[in-house]
Structures are given as structure tokens and as C-alpha cells.
Amino acid sequence: MSEENNNLGDDIKKGAEEAAEAAKDFANEAKETANDMVDEAKEIVNSTENKKMLAGILAIVVGSFGVHKFMLGYTKEGIIQIVITFVTCGIGSFIGLIEGIIYLTKSDEEFYQTYQVGKKPWF
């Protein structure tokens, strides 16, 4: 009986060690997959075309709040856009609409050179 308990205990230890090893392998694979996904997401977010598209859509939809300005890194201009919208009782929101149309009609290279390299904050 004692020998059976001893063998059973050895089997349990062996099974636990195998489970721990499998868990480590799974965790390492999950980390690698997560890192790959983060790298791909960074590439997508930092690509010029996606910034242009996102900035243009944000400018058209919620341009009155200057969201597109904040996304492009123009914090001061974003705050100015909010103030203009409130002071003009919403009429200033047409600025965002116009900018969104301009963003979307520019080529990717032209958008990149104008708004990301040249840092042109308005129109």
C-alpha cells in the first residue's frame, strides 16, 4: 500500500512538472504573439495614410472639438478650435469640416510633408 502511494505521488509530481512546463511554453508563445501584435499596431498607427484618413474623418465628424488637431500633435491649435467653436456658438465648427476635406484630398506624401514634417497647424 505504501509503495502504491509512493508511485501515485511520483505520478502526480511528474504530471505537475509537465503541466508547469506546458504552461511556461504557452506563456512564452503568448508573449511573442502579443509583442508581434503590438509591433503591427504601432506600424499601423504610425503610418501616414492612416493618420491622414483618421485626421480627415475626425475633422469632418467632430472637428468642432479640435480632436484632429490633438491627434496630429497640435495641442494649442486644438484648444483654440474648441474656444472658437464655443465663442461663435458652433459656427467655428466649419473650420474642422473644411480641414477634413483638405486632409482627405491631399496625397499621402503631401499630407505627411505639410502636417507632420512642416507642422502647418491651419489649413
Image (spheres, rainbow, N blue to C red):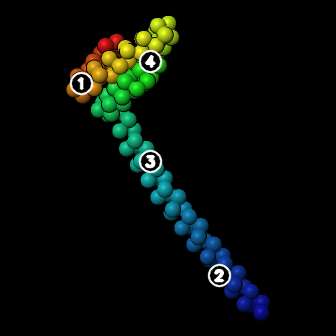
**Residue located 54% across and 62% down the image:** 24
Left or right: 70 as drawn, with respect to 119: right
Judging by the rendered image, the residue that carries numbered circle 1 is: 105
Q: How far is the residue under mark 4 from the one under mark 1? A: 20 Å
- Name the residue nearer the viewer: 79 or 35: 79
Q: How far is the residue under mark 3 from the one under mark 1? A: 35 Å
Earlier in the chain: of badge 3 and badge 2, it is: 2
**Residue located 77% across and 93% down the image:** 1
Q: How far is the residue under mark 3 from the one under mark 2? A: 36 Å
- Name the residue nearer the viewer: 66 or 12: 66
Judging by the rendered image, the residue that carries numbered circle 3 is: 35
Earlier in the chain: of badge 4 and badge 1, it is: 4
Q: Are marks 4 and 1 in contact (CB under 8 Å)?
A: no
Earlier in the chain: of badge 3 and badge 1, it is: 3
Judging by the rendered image, the residue that carries numbered circle 4 is: 64
Q: Are marks 3 and 1 in contact (CB under 8 Å)?
A: no
**Residue located 37% across and 14% down the image:** 95
Left or right: 83 as drawn, with respect to 8: left
Q: Is residue 112 visible?
A: no
Q: Are marks 1 and 2 in contact (CB under 8 Å)?
A: no
Earlier in the chain: of badge 2 and badge 4, it is: 2
